[in-house]
Amino acid sequence: MNEKFARLRRLRQSEGMRALVAETAVRTDKLIYPIFVRYGENVKEEIESMPGVYRYSVDRLGEIADEVLAAGIGGVLLFGIPEHKDACGSGAWDEDGVVPRAVRFLKEYCAKRGKNLLIIADICLCEYTSHGHCGMLEGGGVDNDKSLPLHAKAALAAAKAGADIVAPSSMMDGVVAAIRAALDGAGYANTPILGYSAKFASAFYGPFRDAADSAPQSGDRKGYQMDFRNGREALRELAADEAEGADMLMVKPGLAYLDVLSEARKNTLLPLAVYNVSGEYSMVKAAAAAGMLDERKIVTEILTAFFRAGADIVITYHALDFAQWSRGE
Ligand code: PBG
């Protein structure tokens, strides 16, 4: 037969053939699992809007550390929920605050077991401010430059406690430069910064704000997080973080922003992370619980899409489930 068309189906004939030509694979050690750490003692409570995700008090973090280590997941991203909030979010840079205590606890816990757990500390003020915004409020809005030193102090507190990476998530202009200067000045030149570079003002953060009790008391975050109508501007944000000295960049959320991720990949040589956020997780969980879709297949497809689009690292609440499935459990 004289073929006038490409026989692309030739390479799809068997599972073995398909595996051979597969371009992308999800590796468990490229996944980061977010953990919510709260004040108090002996607490492990499920987050209502995020089935299967829990808030832990520091003393019970060993349980989740064991799971993460056994799963071979790349690391964890810590968020803190303090007992007290105030106008300037002082809990964020308290050296005895929830996150620094969690970092010290986890490092010690794992070291005792001859293990090391890679810890990324999220650096933001919104979980610690009484008004729920990501910086200091001044004249009805978040004052960018007054907020910078507070972020720098928070990053330093996390680095001192032993965090391997700090990740500023507030979208303040200049926050990467401010943190870099503070870390370098205090002897932490080797602590990398993962910038939440292109972070959009998104309704997909709904369940997280529940989980971290960080919803803004008034207004929204559109004055600092990106407008989801903009793709080119995301490249400016990524370039700005890179110029300020970020070691890794991030696009967030993931699913509705694969175009941004793919463009980001073409525009930077730095490692690139994507955050598969709370709302994306909860949608899948809800649909699966309702019997509307196959959770395992959907999650695999979603995680694969992130890597195919250009991510090196995927931050996802599905990490533990995925690891379990890949071990055939
Ligand atoms: C803090 C922060 C948020 C998320 C990560 N860091 C919330 C927000 O910006 O409102 C969202 C993560 C998620 O939805 O899973 N600034």
Image: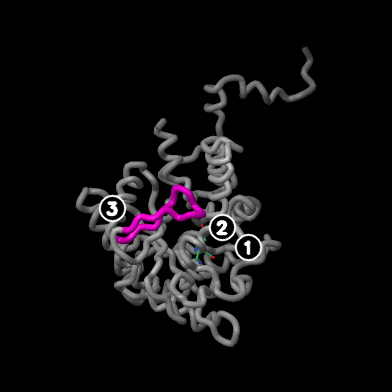
- Which residue position is annotated with label 1? 234
**CA separation in Å, label 2 and label 3:** 30 Å
Identify residue type, mark 1: Ala
Q: Earlier in the sequence, mark 2 or mark 1?
A: 1
- Magenta region, residue range: 43-58
Identify residue type, mark 3: Gly
Mark 2 in CB contact with mark 3 (< 8 angstroms): no
- Which residue position is annotated with label 3? 62
Q: Say if 244 sits above or below 70 in the image.
A: below
- Which residue position is annotated with label 2? 251
Identify residue type, mark 2: Val
Q: Is residue 313 visible?
A: no
Instruction: Work out whether residue 285 or residue 64 is closer to the camera in this orientation and state it.
Output: 285
Figure label count: 3
On whether residue 57 falls in the magenta region, the answer is yes
Extreme residue toward the left, this view = 112
Extreme residue toward the top, this view = 1
Disc 1 under 8 Å from ligand 1? The reply is no
Q: Earlier in the sequence, mark 2 or mark 3?
A: 3
> Under tag 2, what secondary structure?
strand
**CA separation in Å, label 2 and label 1:** 8 Å
Q: Alpha-carbon neighbours of circle 3 within 10 Å: few (<14), some, or many (≥20)? A: some
Q: Earlier in the sequence, mark 1 or mark 3?
A: 3
